[in-house]
Image (cartoon, coloured by chain):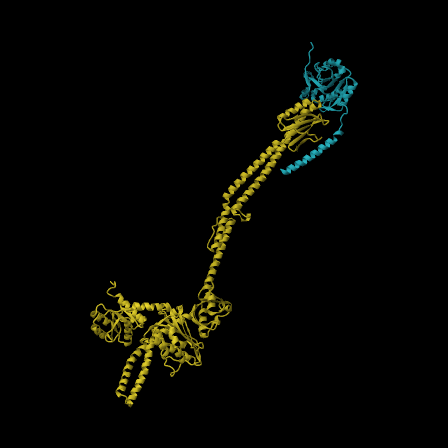
Amino acid sequence: MVARGAGMGTARLVALAALAAVVALAPATARPADPPTDRDVKAAFLYRFTQYVEWPTAAFESPDSPVVLGVLGDAAYVQVIAASAGGKSAGGRPIVVRQLQSPSGAVGCHVVFVGASQAAAVPAIVRAVSASPVLTVSDAAEFAKAGGAVGFVVRNGKVAFQINVGAAGRAGLKVSSKLLRLAEIVEEERRA
Amino acid sequence: MRHASYADMPLRTKITLITAVTTAVVVIVVAAVLLTGDITHVRTSMVNRVSGLAEVVGANTAAAVVFDDPTAAEEVLSTLSREPLVAQAWVYSGDGSVFAEYQAPGAEPGAAVCPVPGMDGATFHGDHLHAFVTIRQGGDAVGTLVLRADTSELRERMLLAVLTAVAAMGCAVGLAVLLASKLQRFVSEPVASLAGAAQRVSETGDYSVRVTKRGDDEVGRLCDSFNDMLGQIERRDRALEFLAAIEQAGDAIVITDPDGVIEYVNPSFERITGYARTEVEGKNPRVLKSGKQEPAFYEDLWKTIGRGEVWRGHFTNRRKDGSLYEEEAIISPVRSASGAIVKYVAAKRDVTNERRIEEQMRQSQKMEAIGELAGGIAHDLNNVLTVINGHAELMLERAKGVASPMTKSATEILSGGRRAALLVKQLLAFSRRQMLQPKVLDLNALVAGMRDMLQSLVSERVEITLSLDPEAGFVEADPGQLEQVLVDLVVNARDAMPTGGRLAIGTENVTPDEEFRRSHPDRRAASYVVLSVADTGAGMPPEVMGRIFEPFFTTKGKEKGSGLGLAMVYGVVKQSGGEIDVQSAPGRGTTFRIHFPVAGTRTLREMADATAERAARGTETVLVVDDEAPVREFVSTVLKGLGYTVIQASDGLDALRAAGEHAGPVHLAITDLAMPAMGGGRLADRLSRLRPGAQVLYISSYSNGDAGRDEMLDPGMHVLRRPFSAETLARKVREVLTKHAPGSAVV
């Protein structure tokens, strides 16, 4: 047991040395000088949503067909999103970011992001993809309640999101419970 | 009981100890192995459990991390409360800052544990287990989950295991000791019994002890070897005892090889012959040859034993110092198993002493016979001489001094007759038939008183020295005869020293030694006074020594001696109850030693004199009857001196007459047994009718040794044996009278 203790002592020394190395290296690791903007966060989230959503097989032409992320919004936003998700993959499929010129372009995409600036196009988009396996995301206000799948909101100054489970279900998408747990679950508000 | 070291412990303690130590070691090893295995297993399972937990929690917090929702992460972490192992948990975001943390309720909060990049897995840090899991999202590392698990459960478990092991060890050792103490006897008892037997053997020297074998194991074989060794020792011991028996035998034992070369002699041989063992071993027994045996004697010996027969015989051999000794020997051949003679063994006994004593006995018997013969002749011759001399005197008386050829012849007859009478008297002395008048006397005084007279007998060239023991006891003897004895011995010594020499006369008290008792078996006195006469003269050879007391034996030639001097000495000494011995060798002088029984020691004697005299006195009337006037006179004088009234009578008839004439009572008659006309017996018979109540005391002329020849001696009769002293007479008379006095209580 004594010999064992000595071994543990050695292990402890190694751990301490490793810790010291970490502490020494810490300043060198890349750390954004400026806090990320909401747009950056949303772009990152957009990519991450693809990790927690499962599309029906029929949504893709072939097993290696890409996940198409359509963006309906200003060019700068598209650029940020392309930087965040472009070249990455989801479920083994490459993610392709595409700028949509009109709501009709949403068909054939797997994820459609509608920028707040395009809030007017929301109903059309929702309608256009209502029966398609398309995850609709928008930072337009009350998007989820309006029939979109995922809507960004700001809570306590932080970006959060709402998920309309019904909308996602209708689209034939399986949203991971892990994502649902992080989201505010909302339902469509039926307009009279 | 304390033991200085393990080596001194009894076997059973050792066995118990070995068992206990072995058991303890085995239990420790087994416990260590099991414990190590158990701990390794527990640690591994703990690591697996915590790692697994970390994996799960890490996966579950991934979404919270990527969507930057610490609350959600903490919610996930809070599920860890179900797992009591986990004390703390941290979720680090990709930039290394703490994203969420968890603290188990009641757990000791510790410093945050920083993750090490790329180091997934679990490591033990002191009392804790740290598990690191990289939180991944779609292949990207988005953060790290660190779990800090409390290992107190592990420690408790380890402690419990150690305690269990210790308890098990204690039980096992206890059980082992208990079992060993019960079972050790299967091993230790045979060894202990062997050790006990060995100790018994060494203490008592009893090699007949055997140990009982209990099995055919090593101890059993040791028992066999031990018993076998004991057997060998026993046999060897017995052989040594045989050797000791031979070594200590009183007989000389000689062992020779078939050629007669001495291989062994025992200590008795050394003692008898004077030769040391080393001097005779390897030699022939002929070193002992004296030349007294003819060569034919030895030829016969060798022929006999050479045939394988036992030879018995007598040797006269020579000691190393040259002296001769007599030896009886039995020589036996010793045969080997094949029948060949391999040795001769001789058992020899020194019989020199026995031979000498036999010779002495023979000598004394011879002297006895000669005495008888001489005495008988002398007695008869005395009667004849009495007639011859009497008539010769008568003739001379009748001639009334007128000289004539007849008176001359008568004078010659008388002269010759008187010489013959003297010879006869000496012969009677030799044959112990002369009348002695013994009294208790002081030898020292007698010898001292004769000194001048003795010196005048010898020439000036003979120096007489007296060595008289002042403590020498009194003897009872006839003083006149004793003087004659001394004169004869001195004359004999003088004649042995014609050119002068020394003559030593001595007295001493002696206690009879073995040799004296053997050569004089009928002398039983407890102590003796020895009168010795030693000269430095020519000495004599044994053959002369054997005959010197015989009458008419002389070496001096006819003219110098009658040959009756020493014969008379012999007779007087014997008649006085003594013994005379002579020691002599040619050139070594001659010593005569006369043993007289002690009649009284000096001081006791003087005291006894007075007492005895008082006690022996009396006033009774005693009739003294003896045909020998000197005896009658002696007895009468003594008794009158003591106060008795004495009537004398010369024979039986005279006695009866005197007793009849005496007016008063007659209390006692002292009478010679053998008297002419009427013997003592018939006188007593007649007297008892004349004077009833008168006691009779007989005087017997024969010595004790001749008691069987006394006529009519009944056990109840009172007998006084000649020679007797005045004191003996007085005591005896008083004894008889007192015993039969009317007033005494005799039934």
Residue B716 visible in rendering:
no
What colour has chain A?
cyan
Please identify the quarter of the rendering in which residue A18 is found. Answer: top right
* Residue B108 spot, x, y in % from top left: 64, 29
What colour has chain B?
yellow
Q: Nearer the viewer, residue B89 or B433?
A: B433
* Residue B293 spot, x, y in % from top left: 44, 74
Q: Nearer the viewer, residue B347 or A159?
A: A159
Please identify the quarter of the rendering in which residue A118 is found. Answer: top right
* Residue B323 spot, x, y in % from top left: 46, 73
Q: Is residue B624 above or below residue B50?
A: below
Q: Is residue B122 left or right of residue B704?
A: right
- Which residue is depicted at the point 53% across and 40% down? B174
Q: Is residue B698 left or right of residue B366?
A: left
Q: Nearer the viewer, residue A119 or B335?
A: A119
* Residue B588 spot, x, y in % from top left: 45, 76
Q: Quadrant of the C terminus of chain B?
A: bottom left
Please identify the quarter of the rendering in which residue A79 is found. Answer: top right
Q: Is residue B343 above or below residue A23?
A: below
Q: Residue furthest bottom?
A: B404
Q: Nearer the viewer, residue B164 or B442?
A: B442
Q: Is residue B671 left or right of residue B69?
A: left
Residue B42 visible in rendering:
yes
Give the total number of marks visible in the rendering: 0
